[in-house]
Image: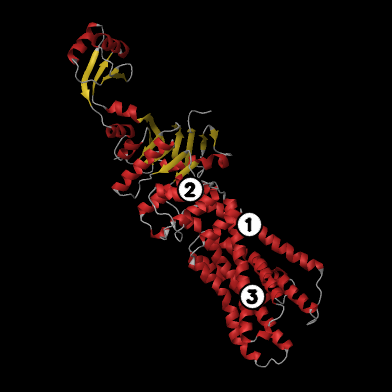
Amino acid sequence: MRKLVWCELYKLKRSKSLLLLTSLALLFPAALTVFTKSSLADAAGTAELHAYYDNLVNYTLAYGAMLLLPCLFGCVGALLFFSERDCDTFKNLQAIPVTRNQLIFAKLGVLYLWSELYALCSGLAVTLFCFVLEPRTLYDVPFKLVCFLLAGLTMATVSLPVVVLVIYSNQSYLLSLLLSFLYAVVNWLLLILFASHEVLSLWLPLLNGLMFVSRLLAWRKAALGLASLTPLPLGTYLRVSLYLLFILGVCILLLVRFYKKWSR
Amino acid sequence: MSRYIVETRGLTKQYGTQKSVADLHLHIAPGRIYGLLGRNGAGKTTTMKMLLGLTRPTSGEVFLWGTPLPGHEKELLPRIGSLIEAPGFYPNLTATENLRIFAALRGVPNRHAIRDALELVGLPYRDKKLFSQYSMGMKQRLAIALAVMHDPELLILDEPTNGLDPIGIAEMRSFIRRLCEERGKTILISSHILSEISLLADDIGILDHGVLLEEESLAVLEQNSRKHIRFAVSDTARAAAILEQQFQETAFSIQDDHILRLYNLDVPAGRMVTAFVKNGLEVSEVCTCEESLEDHFKQVTGGEGIA
């Protein structure tokens, strides 16, 4: 499996599309920094400077991870899963033999790795831009980066349905891009419409995807004495964990089914 | 231990109501080049795909080295090198990079395997040219390099000369011959071009509409197609004895109970007929015949199409 993952990464060498998609990790950190830098002039003390960094991290997670990542995730999924179809290399792999299941899991592994890379780039970009504006804004950077990595993992999981859709439709890259965009926008709209609804909010992918990260950030603030923490019942964490595992399981089953169907 | 490297029993592939391959009994002996000859759509590629497990047969069995393929793919497939249909590689990578991927997945132990394979087919090692910039001939060469890189015992090559220029075709032909003669590889090669197969193969299988019409060695086919005198007699065994005893003639073959072919044309045919009649044989036809390989294939397949 390690070799297969290495090969999947190697196949992406010189892929301009992937480079472009990954570079979009800088989009929201850059835009948010530009739009909010004026507020930094009013910040007098260290607490306010730290709050600026915190806000920028939160906004980047909200826009970069919740809005943009699912969209890009679908596109990267299309790049990875369509490569054998488009290059007609599946016969070469099968003759080795590499099974479809092995290939699917290797591609999923690379998708998660890309998601982590994207999230880390976002985190590093926010940190770098803040450092350039005002070095004193930065604090607790390693912890923030860990949060970004966790966001990459959980948001990748809630974005898996878009990869299933892309594989199911088995169309061009353009349609895959549109599907991914649609998935991201619909989820974002659902978030806006139902985030305050007590029951429906429990089922929103984006909220569940970022729940652990937001709790971790809140816990850390409380631990540093910067804010108070309202504890959540253990059942909430269990429910979110099961929700993520359920999505992962169902999506893997569907991916295997659809990929096998059209790669036969 | 089977005497065949590849053997199929009743191999059939059906798509909907159409049989692409029907009840195929293929036999490929070790160290031979087997040419699968057939028109476009005859079922050559489907057969090869089934031999590699790329397509599941509707019925029938595939045996490789005497072992059934299903369930033994991991031990059997690494012993095979293949080129099926068009060469498939990643366009954003160079030839060396493409081969590096498959070498890693195959676990090729030889560090120089990629360089050797590329040199063997006349492609440069560590060239910066991407696969997308390759000509059709170069792509085909790279596909052959992939097939031989892990030093397999059996090569399955689906129309390997496709897209090559005449010199490239001749080079590929001698390359395939060398693989068989110098390295002892068993090779299954498909083509719709008769001259290609007749120049290369030791054994030939003629496939038409998914049915294997004939499976014979080239030597036998060539002998049958030589210029000869054809005797139609009432008993070929007795006629043969007369030829041997009275005329000391051994260059003949018995086609069936009534047809005998004599390959020496410098014989007194009239005296032979007299001798047959004197010995109580009925002679209904005597003629000089010549059937080219092409005529034979046309006759077998029932029409045009194999050039």
- Element carrying mark 2: helix
Q: Tell me which amino acid carries mark 2.
A: Ala
Q: Chain of mark 2?
A: B
Identify which residue is drawn at 70% across, 63% down: A244
Q: Quadrant of residue B231?
A: top left
| Residue position for label 2 | B113
State if disc 1 and disc 3 touch (CB < 8 Å).
Answer: no
Q: Tell me which amino acid carries mark 3.
A: Gly
Side (left or right) of A217 relative to A15: right
Identify which residue is drawn at 55% across, 58% down: A8
| Residue position for label 1 | A252
Identify which residue is drawn at 21% across, 12% down: B272
Can see residue B210?
no
Q: Chain of mark 3?
A: A
- Element carrying mark 1: helix
Separation of marks 3 and 1 at Cα, in angstroms: 28 Å
Residue A123 is tagged as 3
Separation of marks 2 and 3 at Cα, in angstroms: 43 Å
Side (left or right) of A67 relative to A246: left
Can see residue A53?
yes
Side (left or right) of A54 relative to B74: right
Q: Tell me which amino acid carries mark 1.
A: Ile
Q: Quadrant of residue B128?
A: bottom left
- Element carrying mark 3: helix
- Residue closest to the eye, B162 or B254: B162
The colour mode here is: secondary structure
For label 3, count other residues whose C-alpha is less than 10 Å away and answer few (under 14), some (14-19) or many (20+): many
For label 1, count other residues whose C-alpha is less than 10 Å away and answer few (under 14), some (14-19) or many (20+): many
Separation of marks 1 and 2 at Cα, in angstroms: 36 Å
